Amino acid sequence: MKKLMTLLAVSGFAVAGEASADYALNLTEGVTELSRDIHDLHMLIFWICVGIGVLVYGILVYSLIHHRKSKGAVPAQFHENTKIEILWTVIPFLILLGMAIPATRVMIKVYDTTGADLTVKVTGYQWKWKYDYLDEGVSFFSTLSAKSNEARQMGSGIDPATVDHYLLDVDHPLVLPVGKKVRFLFTGGDVLHAWWVPDLGWKKDTIPGFITDGWATIEKPGTYRGQCTELCGRDHAFMPIVVIAKPEAEYREWLAAQKGTAVQAAGEPATSQEKPSDHQPEPPLAAAGSSEATSPAPAIGEPLTQEVAMTLGKEVYESHCQSCHQANGEGVPGLFPAIHGSQVVQGPLAAHIQLVLNGKPPLMASFRNILKPQEVAAVITYQRNAFGNSTGDLVQPADIATH
Amino acid sequence: MALHGSYFLPHKATQPIIGSIGLFVLLAGFSNYLNGSDIGPAMMWVGAGTIIYMMFIWFAAIIRESLGGLYNHQVEISFKMGMMWFITSEVFFFAAFFGALYYCRDLALPWLGGDTPGTGIDSTHQFLWDSFKNVWPTNGPAHIGGNEEGEFEPMAAWGIPAINTLILLTSGVTVTWAHWGLLKDNRRQLIIGLALTVLLGFGFVFLQGVEYHEAYTEMGLTLGTGIYGSTFFMLTGFHGLHVTIGAIFLLIVLIRSLRGHFSSHNHFAFEAAAWYWHFVDVVWLGLFIFVYWL
Amino acid sequence: MSVSAIHDDHHDHGPAKGLMRWVTTTNHKDIGTLYMVTSLIMFMVGGAMALVIRAELFEPGMQFVDPMFYNSMTTLHALIMVFGAVMPAFAGLANWMIPMMIGSPDMALPRLNNWSFWLLPFAVLMLMSTLFMEGGAAAAGWTLYPPLVLQTGAAFPFTIFTIHILGVSSILAAINIIVTILNMRAPGMTLMKMPLFVWTWLITAFLLIAIMPVFAGAVTMLLTDKFFGTSFFNAAGGGDPVLYQHLFWFFGHPEVYVLILPSFGIVSQIIPTFSRKRLFGYSSMVYATASIGFLSFIVWGHHQYTVGMPIEGELYFTYATMLIAVPTGVKVFNWISTMWRGAITFESPMLWAIAFVVLFTLGGFTGLMMSISPADLQYHDTYFIVAHFHYVLVSGAVFAIIGGVYYWLPKWTGRMYDERLAQLHFWLTTLSVNLCFFPQHFLGLAGMPRRIPDYALQFAEFNAWSSVGGFIFGFSQLIFCYIVIRCMRRQGEHASDEVWEGAGEHGLEFTLPSPAPYHTWETPPNVH
Ligand code: HEA
Ligand code: HEA
Ligand code: CUA
Ligand SMILES: [Cu+2]
């Protein structure tokens, strides 16, 4: 029964470890009322289970030690006892009742998304998150940071230990105000994902075609990290979530800055050249509001030159298409078709545009509401003239808008 | 219970392995076909042929053993119980599709259509499908399938479906009448009853074919017509398949009756076919009410 | 031809010779052996996949496999372990033991019995072949959730049809077992005299008949959604991806009890024998099993606490799920009371049974924690769940199976296994299973999601331990293979007919000779 002792010791250790927070062994207490309630509930049921465990295992061990044949034990003859059997049916039932009541209370609280101060719509895509600040007209994509992304490639030769927040860092974190009730609306753009930041206390699935919701009032400024927790395909492990909670005033500032970039970016497609050094996919389009809700009539923009189209197209490709069609445009056999030599890409333009705008559910998302016409034009131009394709076509935003 | 000494145990069964291979080839062929590979159809023919052959030799063995008097009462009980539990499993198979129908009509569509105000889920309608009204029958917010305008005509209950209901109910009566005949050792009644049942069964299948043809060619209603088309054709299609199997089963029983295989106290095959037929009948009533009528 | 003449034809002849014996056999012991051997092989295959998973997870960073292949590995690992290893092992035990335990000459429908077995290798063949197809094997998890599963390449229809074949196989086996138990008992063997293993299998078989068709129906809808344009799981057409989850878990939850109820039965056979005492609370064991079976149908939503169902559903599923702890507790208490004031010895089967009680209960506790819906909003889809289900599946179901094999192996082969090696096997396995799965509790609570091939640095340490544990566990099973093969090759000491001291009191099978003859109970025993 050494095993048993070790188990109990380790469980005890688990709880002790809670104190020294740097070595996470237990559920986080988190930074919201919900997460604390849930943590408390967790500890309550944990201790009840430990209690029952000690009792049950204790009796078992006692019996194993004292009722051994080698100790000369003679088997007793009893084999039922109605009273005790009723007792050990009723007592667990009552214990369960004791757990069900607080559980119900907390669950009702979790579901109360009314009276929110602001609403953020979260859309899960393969493999990035899109955040829409519904009342603010700000919207952007959030993907795994370039450093982590580089290090996580097989044979990258980069030691993950040298990467800050390996796999838990993104290019554009979600910024939220402290002390405000934030309501989240979740939906999926292609397959199921789930949005989970442990410090907020819960996770929620994002379901294509449906909206689910949740809420959080973050109490402490800080950076909170989480991950997608519903298997969503090849890069499921690589779509983290970062929430930065700021005091109200700083949040306002950030918001204003976002709106600024959005306006700026819309007029100047090639802003990303500002940051050439870290080849982080810093798409101007991502920072820009490209949501259907925020920009009702997206500006078609200036006609593109071949050169601008190819530069912008490459960026769009890298941030939106490459995860499936691959950096070299060869795709993944049997899963994602190659762009190189594709019939669609080399064929009539209309079909190519249709495909990108409408997608191919459930295989490829529709990009109509993700990209702006000039971005679609650019990426199509790029695909038709890169990876060994050379149609020479130059697609204009106006061609897209007419589809 | 219990005359174990004479419980018949078959030996050297070759049918199952043939059946397994047949099923494997059939389904691998079907997969290949779905994947667009050319060898698919050929494999499917071979597989299906093998399965039919397997059924033939399996039933032949059972008939031989049964006529040889090898089956005592206990064996017959095993067969009966086996058939009963098999039908139970079929009930659950249909339950899955009825469950899908119920879920979509009573839960998913109201959520999509915004009929559940005050719940978080109502946002689904507000943000994603605000022009969608939940009226059954529907092919969903995006009007999947249907004619060019995404429209379709639902199947009315009081045309062919009502006739088909009558047909199946009548066939339930005729098969019972045949059974009475068998119990009284009245061969004529048995054979006429069975023949009528088989005719009614195939009549049902024929009418359903007509109905499907009309749906596909004139009503814009196909398997791909949103959730209505999906549930409609899945439920009625699998039911139709079961009617066909049941009718073939009854046909075999009819042929065996003509050859005088059954007696008033030894006719498991007849009973099995009759039970199966009643099961198909009951499922149809469910279909008629929930798929066509309500 | 008179009845007796035909019968005599078949009388007393032993097994046919050669390969065809196994292909065409209708003998319950042969079929039982086929099932058990298949199960062991599939345990290796599924285990090898688990080791691919553990190797990749040994340290952070992508080392060995593509993420897509990793996902295929978790998917196939689970499907193979559940449908290829554990269920066939139970079917094998049922075939071997049920007729011997209830005093029947064979299973009620022997030809069908052969078919339910022989469908299995073809299903497995089909599933394994998908590994070599364009786009790789299915990689959407064993739950096969749409829309993700619809992105599967050429493997897709093959995976679906594998499940159909497995379904047919399980349903036929279940029908056979029910009919055998209800129709083939020896005179005097009333239902409430049946050994608990028989009882648990009877209820398991009912579960199978109800759930496998639903699973088959659900995957059929996947197939038509992909290839025939239906909209069952597509909101645009009026369906709902979550509908699939409801159908899957209506199957999936009872399925996990399919994997544990026969284990309860095995443990209920072993503990009384080595406590030298009658099973405590026989009738409450039967009622508890039936209650678990019933409850298992109405709790499926606890796998979907995060899909955003209405709060009423959320709470209902919470309460219903918690209730399962009550009958399960009754079983645990009964086992302990059986040992209480017994005369316990610690032969291998007993060790496995005791470890089962301890570790299964531990897994049950975490299950109970997860049933509390608000808390599960944190636990869901993390390694906490992975820890939970491996405690109940590996140190639960697999331990019970291994214990059962040690318990009955001497009866099957007539040889005693090597007790010292068996003890070594037990201790290595038990220690390593905890090393492998216990740290996963911490990982889950600390925030590591499941189904990921690579993880953040703070999870590195426990993952390394877990991988080491997994590899020790895996290689310890080679000892088991050696022990079993030795007995099968008729090496080792002869076993007595009773095998275990006083075992004859606990089951009809121990009143038969060891090894059990090819045909048993051709004249039914007298049961009193
Ligand atoms: C053999 C298989 C098996 C068994 C027996 C169980 C048993 C239980 N399981 Fe488990 N479960 C799985 C296999 C199993 N499970 C699998 C495979 C999954 C994951 C599937 C996937 O997503 O891939 C899963 C997932 C799973 C979830 C979903 C988690 C999630 O995804 O978020 C939940 C949630 O409620 C759950 C609960 C339970 C409960 C309450 C029991 C109960 O039956 C446990 C009852 C037992 C006890 C409680 C211990 C003994 C009792 C006492 C000593 C009495 C006194 C005790 C008290 C009053 C507390 N299980
Ligand atoms: C009965 C079912 C069962 C069994 C027995 C096991 C056994 C094991 N499982 Fe598994 N597992 C599941 C059912 C089971 N599992 C399920 C349902 C899932 C969820 C899948 C999903 O998410 O969809 C899962 C998922 C799962 C994961 C999570 C993957 C992920 O989420 O990314 C992990 C990770 O550690 C794991 C590990 C193991 C290990 C180490 C064993 C070990 O116990 C196995 C040990 C056995 C061996 C290693 C074989 C021994 C033989 C040899 C070593 C010989 C060498 C081999 C040859 C010569 C061929 N399993
Ligand atoms: Cu997105 Cu997992
Ligand atoms: Cu469950």
Image (spheres, helix red, strand yellow):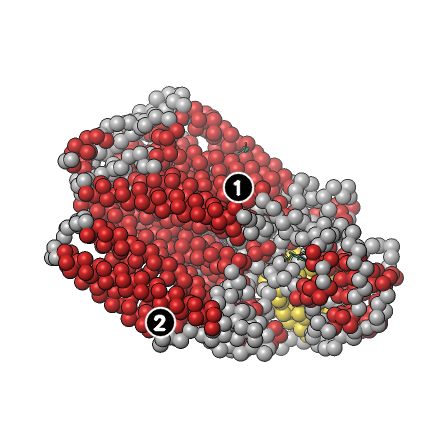
Determine the CA span between mark 1 and mark 2: 44 Å
In which quadrant will I find the N terminus of chain C?
Answer: top left
C261 lies left or right of B77? right
**Mark 1: which amino acid?**
Met
In which quadrant will I find the C terminus of chain C?
Answer: top left
Could you classify mark 2 by the number of other residues whose Cα lies within 10 Å: few (under 14), some (14-19), or many (20 or more)? many
C108 lies left or right of B220? left
Residue C179 marker? none
Could you classify mark 1 by the number of other residues whose Cα lies within 10 Å: few (under 14), some (14-19), or many (20 or more)? some
**Mark 2: which amino acid?**
Pro
Q: Residue at x 62, y 58 (%)?
A: A363
Q: Which residue is denoted by mark 2 in the rendering?
A: B161
Q: Quick check: A99 above or below C16?
A: below
Q: Residue at x 35, y 63 (%)?
A: B205
Whole-percent x, y for residue A275 in the image: 86, 59
Q: Which residue is denoted by mark 1 in the rendering?
A: C128
Task: State the residue in front, B205 or A98.
Answer: B205
Task: State the residue in front, C126 or B154.
Answer: B154
